[in-house]
Amino acid sequence: MTILVTGGSGFIGSNFIRNVLQLDGVSIVNIDKLTYAGNAENLSDVEGSRYYTFVKGDIGDHELINELLTKHQPRAIINFAAESHVDRSIVSPEDFIATNVVGLFRLLNASKDYWSKLDETGKAAFRFLQVSTDEVYGSLEAGDPAFSETNRFEPNSPYSASKASADHLVRAYHQTYGLPTLTTNCSNNYGSFQFPEKLIPLIILNALDGKNLPVYGDGQQTRDWLYVTDHCDAIADVLNRGVVGETYNIGGESEMTNLDVVRKVCSVLDELRPSISGESYEHLIEYVTDRPGHDRRYAVDITKVKQELGWTPKQTFESGIRKTIQWYLDNQEWVDRVRSGAYREWIIKQYG
Ligand code: NAD
Ligand code: DAU
């Protein structure tokens, strides 16, 4: 079975590809534009595998996608490709519309053309899986029930609005053309290979460098954290056993305030790599200007994926954060290479 993965050189996509290549009989074709967030090095360990093909390209390049579909005849397409950082979407929303909406639309169109020419068995087996986010549902107040698949969309940032648009298009391609689609809406991921613009790796690396740990606003915003390989397992379960046309919420049942996350990272670092002064890394915490339109709380109801597909997260936040911090401590060369060029410019623009 061949799967066309888009955006597979980013954080979640690279973890997914590594997991799937351990299975017998699965080949992966990864098309990635290698934006600042994409890094071919994330998959250097599988580069030589005859089951892995990398193509540098844009999901919006209709001709290239057609060519890849014709050549590799995939049984499934999994779309991870996206601009994924909320703060960047506030500063430069256009890139988010270009990839997350227009790019996704072109990818869907190419997929529909390919799928419509398959024989009946091929048509029945084909799946288009859209990897989406819980942010499409907007923000919860304390005490509100967690997001379920039937919550209405209320996106608040250009990023979440672009992902919500994409989800609507995926739904429309199923309803109108019969394309066998699946959508997953997942909460905040953390783990190895995450680009250090996102909260957890940013805090780990800033602490190790003795830099301030920027907490937006009052730090009481809540996120539902999921270890990345648990998300990858959920995507595989939805791909293999999900009901066509359905959406599945994925989450860690692990709600924490940002301040508690930052404090936890500090306490694990205090244990694994104590600072030279012996002082806790917590003294580096600094409250900074809040994100505009900052969503207060996300929480995901995972009853459907649990009951229908039998998926549950394997890692707790306690076990996952230790693995994550250890990975960043063990992979200093990856960190050094990633933190060059475009990354430095972004950090200066955002944090001064
Ligand atoms: P990421 O930013 O680490 O990776 C995105 C990848 O997409 C990069 O490799 C990038 O080069 C590639 N890409 C960007 N534009 C492209 C284009 N036009 N054509 C081809 N490739 C392109 O993102 P991530 O955190 O791995 O997220 C992957 C997907 O999961 C995204 O769709 C995101 O919205 C979704 N998601 C992320 C999280 C999270 O917490 N990180 C949670 C839920 C859903
Ligand atoms: O909920 C799923 C989403 O999670 C994904 O769809 C996005 O792609 C992913 O980036 C993530 O979005 P968030 O905005 O929640 O993640 P981020 O790591 O940027 O921020 C997590 C929280 O921490 C958020 O409330 C903002 C806050 N924060 C973030 C940064 C970078 C800070 O307080 N300080 C910071 O420096």
Image (cartoon, rainbow, N blue to C red):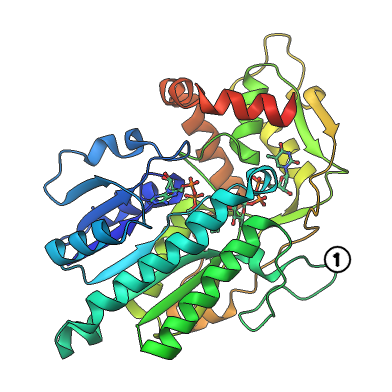
Residue shown at the point (73%, 37%) measured from the top left: 262
Q: Residue at x 50, y 22 (%)?
A: 341
| 268 over 22 or under it: above or below | above
**Residue 178: x %, y % from top left:** 36, 89
Residue 241 is situated, as x and y percent measured from the top left of the image, at: 35, 80
Q: Name the image quarter holding the N terminus.
A: bottom left
Residue 128 position within the rendered picture, expressed as x and y whole percent measured from the top left: 35, 73
Q: Residue furthest right?
A: 218
Q: Is residue 296 left or right of residue 147?
A: right
Question: Residue 269, relative to residue 120: is it above or below?
Answer: above
Estimate how packed mark 1 is, as few (under 14), some (14 to 19) or many (20 or more) residues with alpha carbons within 10 Å.
Answer: few
Q: Tell me if residue 25 can be seen.
A: no
Residue 184 position within the rendered picture, expressed as x and y whole percent measured from the top left = 50, 70
Quadrant housing the C terminus: top right
Q: Amino acid at mark 1?
A: Ala
Q: Which residue is mark 1?
A: 142
Helix, strand or loop under label 1? loop
Q: Which sits in the foreground, 55 or 197?
A: 55
Describe residue 66's horizontal placement relative to residue 314 as left or right. Answer: left
Q: Quadrant of residue 145?
A: bottom right
- Label 1 lies in ligand 2 vicinity (Cβ under 8 Å): no
Q: Residue at x 63, y 44 (%)?
A: 92
